[in-house]
Image (cartoon, rainbow, N blue to C red):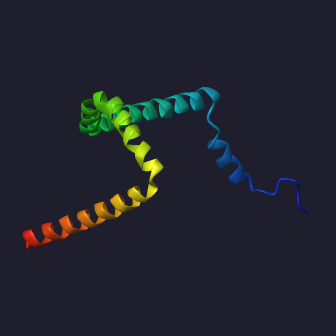
Amino acid sequence: MVRGNDTPRSERKSSQAERKPSRAERKAELEATIEQQRLDLLVASRRWQSASLKIDAGWQTLAPYRKPALIAAGLAALPLLRHPGRLTRWGRKLVVTALAAQRVRRLLTR
């Protein structure tokens, strides 16, 4: 005959020895995990900040020229919008010039 609880008594005793942690213990464990995660975030943010110093410095150098560059781009876009063929022609010239410069650089470095 099989009883409702079919685990042997020896196993039941060992499972009782491996009791669940109390609420206070679990809370302390979670708080320790959160504290470690906060420290990891702090270290990662400092590492990120030091890695992006050069980029930030470059952006701060270019930032004052943002408005004049936007105005110049807008003024340059007006004639190009009226005559879109010019844009494609200049685009082709730009690509050909860039490829030629790249080939010249390769020839000179060999």
Q: How many labels were placed on the picture?
A: 0
Q: Nearer the viewer, residue 19 or 38?
A: 38
Image location of residue 100, percent across then percent down: 21, 68
Relative to residue 8, is residue 53 depicted above or below?
A: above
Relative to residue 55, is residue 3 depicted above or below?
A: below
Image location of residue 66, percent across then percent down: 34, 32
Q: Nearer the viewer, residue 21 or 27?
A: 27
Q: Nearer the viewer, residue 71 or 52?
A: 71
Q: At 30% across and 63% down in the image, what residue appears?
A: 93
- Location of the C terminus (image quadrant): bottom left
Find residue 101 and report its image quarter.
Answer: bottom left
Relative to residue 20, is residue 99 depicted above or below?
A: below
Q: At 8% across and 69% down in the image, what residue appears?
A: 108
Q: At 27% across and 33% down in the image, what residue appears?
A: 62
Q: Nearer the viewer, residue 86 or 11?
A: 86
- Location of the N terminus (image quadrant): bottom right
Q: At 34% across and 37% down in the image, what residue appears?
A: 72
Image location of residue 88, percent across then percent down: 40, 60
Relative to residue 90, is residue 76 depicted above or below?
A: above
Say whether residue 73 is left or right of residue 22.
left
Say whether residue 53 is left or right of residue 86.
left
Image location of residue 83, percent across then percent down: 44, 53
